[in-house]
Image: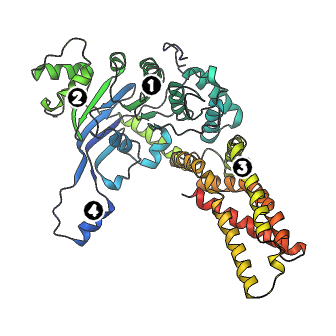
Amino acid sequence: MELPVTMPVSGGQRTTPYRIETRNLGYKLCTQFDEMKFVCCATSRRVPSFILKDVNCEARPVEITAIAGPSGAGKTTLLEILAGKISPKKVCGQVLVNDQPMDTKRFRRISGYVTQDDALFPLLTVEETLMFSALLRLHGGKKEAASKVRQLMKDLGLEHVAASRIGWGSNNGISGGERRRVSIGVDLVHDPGVILIDEPTSGLDSASAFHVVSLLKTMVVNQGKTIILTIHQPGFRILEIFDRIILLSNGTVMHNGSLHLLQQRLNSAGHCIPNHVNLLEFAIDVIGSLDGTPTSEALNIHPFPLQERLVCSHNLEGKLLVYPNSRLEEVVILGQRFCSNIFRTKQLFVTRVIQALVAGLVLGTIFLNVGREKGSIALQTQTGFFAFSLTFLLSSTTEGLPIFLQERRILMTETSKGAYRVSSYVIANTLIFLPFLFMVGLLYSTPVYWLVGLRRNIDGFIYFSLVVWMVLLMSNSVVASQ
């Protein structure tokens, strides 16, 4: 059950204000094949496909800016550029933060970007998800992180599901609205000044959608944040919450201003808005009648005072210099998160243990005592045994591929925000999986080695077991890197 939408967000400390502005922003779709064709065939006159064309807009502090438009208008692309997800080398024009050119690496430290697909560990609880995020993003240790998480769950209305697992769906986990609030909470633990959200109401019912947007509005008012989001079909109540609407059509800004100004422009264009019709949906339907020229409100852009620009620039510099935790602390935190996920995937790991033991027994009986035989035929049989063993060991790790793919998305998201070093993730992953893979390798090696009749001494058995262990480690690494 969803909580009432009137739940307030505690004021807390107001963040540094950030104003985001784009000037003549353009982005064209160009594949590697197109680039090669342009280099090899100088006579090619193919017109590039522009996703965004001369986009001029802004998002101000203490406001919610909604990017709207029909499907394929370039909403998500614009949001990804503002979030620094698209390389500046592929973008023409400028993105300014408080009248200064945006440095994507620095900007990621002071902003939060929530994707449309919630990148969360399904086997962790709500509290654990926020806690691990806080431990990785905050200075001050576990006590400060726990205090921040408790307050955040209260602000987001998640206290009643704190001990519930995220789950794969509403049938065996929290609801869609709650999952969306958890995703937002993950990017709020470090108190960002700018929050960018792709389709925050996607897949939610009207009450849940209004709850999420109302929560964002309260956060904007109380904490002075700048929030930019994309929206597809907002309801009447949600539409009234937005302070600024950026209306896109075919990559071009058709409107940049308030909802009231949009209504005035539609009226001046000769449109009579019917009663009980959503103004934004009506504007999208008749978007061709708007000339796309900047509105008076859009042109009323005042540069930030010099003192505020210097403060924000210093804040960005500090965010870039250090990671929140030392390398050792990162390894410990990530190791704890690995363990929490591993111990809750009992079916997968029990299956791998049984599979290794059964495979060792089966192959051992098939190739019984071939190690003692001599001659060319025996050599071929022994070669077949090693080939079967290698095939089994390399293919036995594919069961965990979906888990690694899910984890990889989270890894790329967290490391891009400077939460921790990639090397810390690799070390923690290796340290956690080393003993488990050693156990799997030992369960396979013990029956198969003695049944096949390989060298009858402990040194040979240890060497064979270590080789099996190394093969499992390599195959596990290959799967994890996909």
Q: Of the numbered discs in the image, which one, if any, rests on residue 284?
A: 2
Quadrant housing residue 174 = top right
Q: What distance separates the C-alpha of mark 4 from that of mark 3?
A: 47 Å
- Label total for image: 4
Closer to the chain start, of discs 3 and 2, is: 2
Q: Of the numbered discs in the image, which one, if any, rests on residue 204?
A: 1
Instruction: Give the residue drawn at x 29%, y 67%.
Output: 36
Please give the residue where the numbered disc 3 appears in the rendered image: 351
Q: Left of 238 or right of it: where is 15? A: right
- Badges 3 and 1: C-beta atoms under 8 Å apart? no
Report the quarter where the C terminus lies: bottom right
Q: Secondary structure at mark 2?
A: helix
Instruction: Give the residue drawn at x 89%, y 76%.
Output: 456
- Badges 2 and 1: C-beta atoms under 8 Å apart? no
Instruction: Give the residue drawn at x 38%, y 43%.
Output: 80
Of residues 253 and 34, the one drawn nearer to the viewer in this rendering: 34
The correct choice, above or below, for 148 with respect to 272 in the image is below
Residue 409 position in % (x across, y down): 52, 47
Closer to the chain start, of discs 2 and 1, is: 1
Q: What distance separates the C-alpha of mark 3 from that of mark 1?
A: 36 Å
Q: What distance separates the C-alpha of mark 3 from that of mark 2?
A: 53 Å
- Give the residue type at disc 1: Leu
Q: Left of 442 or right of it: where is 206? A: left
Q: Of the numbered discs in the image, which one, if any, rests on residue 422?
A: none
- Give the residue type at disc 3: Thr
Q: Nearer the viewer, mark 3 or mark 1?
A: 3
Q: Nearer the viewer, mark 2 or mark 1?
A: 1
Q: Left of 455 or right of it: where is 418? A: left
Circle 2 packing at 10 Å, graded few (<14), some (14-19), many (20+), is some
